[in-house]
Image: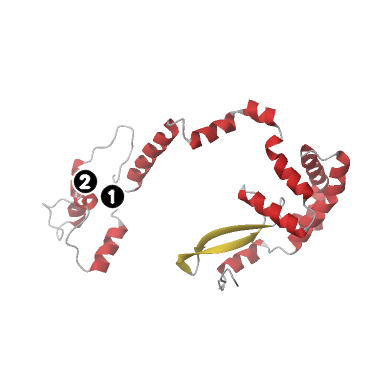
Amino acid sequence: MVKVLISLSVLAAVATAGSVTELPESVTKLIDYSINPCDDFYQYACGAWHNNTVLPPDRYAIDTTFTKIYIENEAALTKIYSDNTTKLGEFYNSCLDTATLSSLGLTPLEDSFKAIRSANTTLDLLIVAGELAKNGIPAFVDINSSADDNDSTKNALFGFRTPLPLGRSYYTNHSKWETVEADYKVYIATVLQLARYTAEQAAAAVPVIIRFEQTLAGVALSSLEEMEVVLSPYTALTYSQ
């Protein structure tokens, strides 16, 4: 059975305007004007579409809303994918070029590693964090803009704690920490050595990193507390404040 959804925006416009003398073609071509709307409103509103629409051979259903949008999206994506000169195609192909990626090794990351190793002050660390954030790598805080929950006509700047590698409870619950501690230390040391730290440098850095993550977890909110904060009233501050 084919179901037709009438756009709520049209109904809202009618209610707001009081009377509508001209409907868009996308609506009028669906209407069967031979039917009295007081006798059969569905047939009046959708009769022309119902009588004239042919089910495509590659579809099991068709309608005037979601299926239509899906088909139009498919066509748009197909056009994008078929154009091998687009940046999207180049980026996709670069991810598949494993031979080049292997030959490059860590070279594309050298500047970031150098900046991290050279950061000796708080200001240096904040500058490095800002540069990393440009590449989608949050350091100490994850900042992004989104609609203000209290006023959808405005955007607000939100700051979130950077996600920890492990769940908060692994850092705050000693029993859970013991189940992953040994493997996690090996993991951190391995990642550092892949970043060209020596074994000695990696071994010295492991407890420092873990201590930092445990401290951060200690001031982090639990999942329930985060939900309560999101739902609680808040006061938006200006940039200068």
The secondary element bearing badge 2 is classed as helix
Q: Is residue 139 visible?
A: no
* In-front residue for pair 155/121: 121
- In the rendered image, which quarter is residue 7 located in? bottom left
Q: Is residue 37 visible?
A: yes
- The crowding category of the residue bearing disc 1, from other C-alpha atoms within 10 Å (few below 14, some 14 to 19, many at least 20), is some
Residue with the mark numbered 2: 49
- Quadrant assignment for the C terminus: bottom right
- Tell me if 77 is positioned left or right of 191 in this view: left
Q: Please, which residue is most extreme toward the left here?
A: 34
| Rendered view: 232 above or below 103 | below
Query: Do labels 2 and 1 touch, CB within 8 Å?
Result: yes
**Residue 110 spot, x, y in % from top left:** 72, 39
Amino acid, disc 1: Val
Amino acid, disc 2: Trp
Q: What's the mark number on residue 4? A: 1
Residue at image x 66%, y 49%? 132
* In-front residue for pair 82/25: 82
Residue at image x 12%, y 53%? 35
Q: CA distance from mark 2 to mark 1?
A: 9 Å
**Residue 122 spot, x, y in % from top left:** 76, 59
- In the rendered image, which quarter is residue 126 located in? bottom right
The secondary element bearing badge 1 is classed as loop
**Residue 232 spot, x, y in % from top left:** 57, 71
- Quadrant assignment for the N terminus: top left
Disc 2 or 1, which lies upstream in sequence? 1
